[in-house]
Amino acid sequence: MTRIPRSLDRLIRPRSIAVFGGKEARRVIEQCDRMGYSGQIWPVHPREEEILGRRCYRSVTELPKAPDAAFVGVNRALTIEIIRELATRGAGGAICYASGFREAANELADGIGLQEALVAAAGDMSIVGPNCYGFINMLDGALLWPDQHGMQRVERGVAILTQSSNIACNISMQKRGLPLAYVMTAGNQAQTGLSDLACAVVEDPRVTAVGLHIEGFDSIEALERLAARARQLRKPIVALKVGKSKAAQLATVSHTASLAGNDRVSSALLARLGIGRVDTLPELLETLKLLHLHGPLDSADISSMSCSGGEASLMADAGVKRRLNFRPLKEDQRQPLKEALGEMVTISNPLDYHTFVWGNREKQSAAFAAMMRGGYALNLIVLDFPRLDRCDAADWVTTCEAVIDAANATAAAAGIVASLGENMPEETALSLIAAGVVPFFGIDEALAAAETAASIGALWRKPPLPPLVTTAVSEGEAETLTEAEAKAELARAGIAVPPGRTAQSPAQAANAGDALGFPIALKRLGVAHKTEAGAVRLDLACRDQVLAAAEAMASGASGYLVEKMVAKPVAEVIVGATRDAVAGPVLTIGAGGILVELLDDTAILTLPTTEEAIREAIDGLKISKLMGGYRGAPQADVASLVKTVAAVASYVVANAAKLDELDINPIMVLPDGRGAVAADALIRRRK
């Protein structure tokens, strides 16, 4: 059932604010006054007559009218009562500051019950929290925020949203020149989640980009809605999703579940939605600076210039681990660069321009402009400032002016990178942002920002995918199909399987071998991991071998599967499906056979998917080199593999309500033109 989102407009851009409580409520008023909030503020207190020069009201019913926003900074029991009164009065929404709800369920037996009561009391009114600091709106000076912060009023900027109030405090203190329009916390997300808040702020025309610090996804529906709307508005989103160390829930019977860890699924989910992903808070802030000024990049081609070979080497080495391209210069760039820099400078990318033009704004501008005319998506100049309290930075200012001149002359995206973040003064960062040049704090962070902005650009250039499959699994009893039953299912779905027959006795197995033609594979049914259990024999060349093998594995056998041996493949691939708690059914593709245990070589696809996405995932595997005809070996029939994986994906989508796991390992990818065959299969589903 589609959830109808509540409007958060009155709450996050309020014209009137009611505050409840003692010192926290006083701080909210102080912060609003400091930032020049022009709306009405109404303190509500049972005993005080006035707070900070404002008359105190005794209750919600005494307020002049229903407030647009309320900060409720009282104990948890009283919070519920006040929220109910605000909802009845028609308030626009409220921040629930109190703790002791769901987050304290292990310590407080009534924590979950109180949270449910809080949501019920709110009804149709929006609430944020509980266990939540609230938010800072620096566009309007509206702060439902009971603490210090380091922010200044801005006319436009980025929004950053997090579940953690302390992370929000830390972000508010940044000195990186990033213009912060909103900093918001979601707390317990009892009713209003992080994605809901982001959906509200992305509609503000003064917001340029959105950053998310995600501990746990709230609503996939809301996240999909946010991603779609952000793409429509051309406002990029970048996420810092934590939880890489958390082990995935493992199923007991398949390889696939151990490959599809929750963090890999998170990456696949974010990529599907066109949301960039970073690994650290500094990377999040640096990426948002780039997106604020220039949006997603058109390509991964970048240039770098510095006045030191050491810095050029640092840039080149840092780029090795990134999906970035220091593309060689075009021929028509070389002569202008030589004219500006002199014959002794080696013309390359990254480029060490030495110090021959140091302090010369005109020659530096000409050199930077020549590089920027190369059609790079982003042009970086490495420049570490000296300490302003001990040194003269005049020549460094000249270099900044030259970069600004070149960027203006070429309309190219440019950034200045301090190799050490502390060597970029905040006042310099602010002036560069104002001039349209990105001030980057750190080489690794700058390249992470470029990589992320390029990835968002690439994702946005693809057509958006349909909504995720969110069908809930049925509550029937789980059953594991035999390999023969599983292969029959797959064959009906259009997936090639070896010719085979089932048998109930060694003699019947031998007869089946005669009928199919040798060599054959013999498998004992009812065993998940056959190799470890000695329940599979391959390349049996005659009736006697089949009979002897069947008798050897007869103990506990519930039957046999006799199959024609598949021809020698170019490569073996695993394809499987599991159900992620957030993303629903997901597909895993990777190196199969014995390589499952040896190589970390997989890709995750959320569903539904396309053949184009499947081909891209396969091309990104290490094993793709083998399938391309490695060292003179034949090329694999990758086209058939793509068709096979697409058929598996369609089967999973069609059976989403009852499928728990699917594991095909291996798919034998034969030489080009000869197909791909599912040699082993396991299906676990609900009856």
Image (spheres, rainbow, N blue to C red):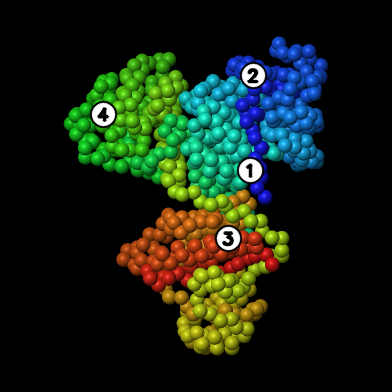
Q: Is residue 618 above or below residue 24?
A: below
Q: Amino acid at mark 4?
A: Ala
Q: Amino acid at mark 2?
A: Gly
Which residue does the image show at 41% across and 64% down from the upper left? 638
- Quarter of the figure that contains the C terminus: bottom right
**Residue 569 at least partly seen:** no
Residue 339 spot, x, y in % from top left: 19, 29
Distance from disc 1 to disc 2, alpha carbons, whole Å, reads: 32 Å
Is the C-beta separation of discs 2 and 3 under 8 Å? no
Q: Which secondary structure, mark 1?
A: loop
Distance from disc 4 to disc 2, alpha carbons, whole Å, reads: 51 Å
N-terminal-most mark, 2 or 3: 2
Q: What residue sits right under mark 1 in the picture?
A: 218
Q: What residue sits right under mark 4 in the picture?
A: 367
Q: Amino acid at mark 3?
A: Val
N-terminal-most mark, 4 or 2: 2
User: Toward which corner of the image does residue 193 lie, by quadrant?
Assistant: top right
Q: What residue sits right under mark 2 in the picture?
A: 39
Q: Nearer the viewer, mark 4 or mark 2?
A: 2
Is the C-beta separation of discs 3 and 1 under 8 Å? no
Residue 190 spot, x, y in % from top left: 70, 39
Mark 1 Cα shell of 10 Å, populated few (<14), some (14-19), many (≥20):
some
N-terminal-most mark, 3 or 1: 1
Residue at the top extreme?
Answer: 53
